């Protein structure tokens, strides 16, 4: 069964979007033979743990066209590629420090004729100090990059005041929120809600941690990565 056949019953995308998911999944499997992009390539696992999981983020997003989103540490494009396919009126910036992953993303975006995808190769903590990127996105997203107390310093500086940061977390989300509380406040964030997401056909429950940006991030943040990870705020 293809990715689209696994997803069809859940009504998460249109026929055309499902076809694009299949094309993207095929490119992922092919490219994965040349270099390691993801551990999950089985169609069912990819459908549920990559595509369904990524699409769940939509319930945490404001409902309007023209949103600008940045996916920090996007890897092979999760959650941002499935979202870009289903949200053509929103602009996605996919950032990762590994160039080969972003080459895969730009080639895939071209193959799928997506005009709402930009790529940025480099480290989050370096880009977010640049005027062009600082506090310039409506939404910051991240999955599988770091614990929340570290991740907040990597993502919140990109988010406009009034925008939001959606961190995709697993079972330990509430502990991570507790641990990151101080840092979130220092960086100008405020916890809005935690939305549990049950992944069908598995016993997994993921959590969308939604943090509102309520004040500018002080200019001394982010620090260098060594400091961020050794001494989280
Ligand atoms: N979001 C993807 C990939 C997770 S793996 C998914 O869920 O499938 C974590 C990714 O974050 C890796 O590709 C790594 O290169 C990237 N990364 C880690 N720290 C980073 C940083 N400081 N800036 C940019 N990318 C980073």
Image: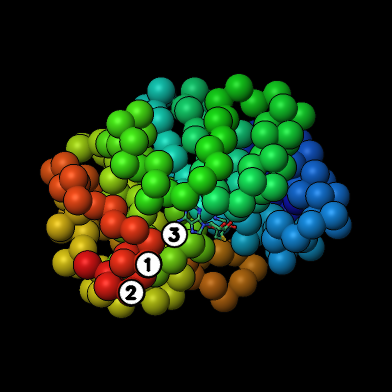
Q: Earlier along the polypeptide chain: callout 2 or callout 3?
A: 3
**Distance CA(mark 2)–CA(mark 3):** 22 Å
Report which residue position mark 2 lands on. Answer: 230
**Distance CA(mark 1)–CA(mark 2):** 6 Å
Residue depth check, mark 2 versus mark 3: number of the one nearer the observer: 2
> Is residue 60 something one can see in this rendering?
no
Above-or-below relation of 138 to 42: above
* Residue displayed at 61% across by 51% down: 98
Task: Tell me whether the residue at label 1 lies in contact with that at label 2, contact meaning CB atoms closer than 8 angstroms.
Answer: yes
Between residue 135 and residue 98, name the one nearer to us: 98
> Is residue 202 something one can see in this rendering?
yes
Query: x and y percent of residue 21 in the render?
Result: 71, 41
**Under tag 3, what secondary structure?**
strand
Q: Quadrant of the N terminus?
A: bottom right
**Under tag 2, what secondary structure?**
helix
Q: How is the image coloured?
A: rainbow
Q: Is mark 3 within 8 Å of ligand 1?
A: yes
Q: Earlier along the polypeptide chain: callout 1 or callout 3?
A: 3
Report which residue position mark 1 lands on. Answer: 226
**Distance CA(mark 1)–CA(mark 3):** 23 Å
Query: x and y percent of residue 78 in the render?
Result: 58, 50
Badge 3: how crowded within 10 Å, few (<14), some, or many (20+)?
A: many
Residue depth check, mark 1 versus mark 3: number of the one nearer the observer: 1
| Numbered mark located on residue 168 in the image | 3
């Amino acid at each position: 069964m293809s990715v689209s056949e696994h997803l069809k019953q859940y009504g998460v995308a249109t026929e055309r979007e499902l076809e694009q998911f299949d094309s993207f999944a095929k490119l992922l499997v092919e490219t994965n033979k040349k270099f390691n992009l993801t551990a999950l390539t089985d169609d069912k696992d990819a459908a549920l743990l990559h595509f369904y999981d990524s699409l769940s983020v939509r319930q945490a997003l404001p409902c309007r066209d023209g949103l600008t989103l940045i996916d920090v540490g996007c890897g092979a494009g999760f959650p941002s590629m499935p979202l870009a396919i289903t949200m053509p009126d929103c602009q996605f910036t996919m950032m990762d420090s590994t160039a080969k992953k972003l080459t895969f993303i730009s080639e895939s975006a071209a193959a799928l004729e997506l005009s709402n995808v930009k790529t940025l190769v480099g480290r989050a903590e370096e880009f977010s100090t640049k005027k062009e990127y600082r506090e310039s996105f409506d939404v910051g997203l991240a999955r599988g990059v770091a614990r929340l107390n570290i991740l907040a310093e990597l993502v919140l500086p990109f988010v406009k005041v009034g925008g939001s940061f959606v961190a995709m977390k697993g079972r330990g989300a509430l502990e991570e929120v507790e641990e990151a509380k101080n840092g979130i406040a220092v960086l100008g964030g405020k916890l809005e809600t935690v939305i549990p997401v049950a992944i069908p056909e598995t016993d997994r429950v993921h959590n969308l941690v939604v943090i509102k940006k309520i004040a500018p991030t002080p200019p001394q943040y982010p620090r260098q990565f060594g400091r961020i990870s050794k001494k989280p705020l």
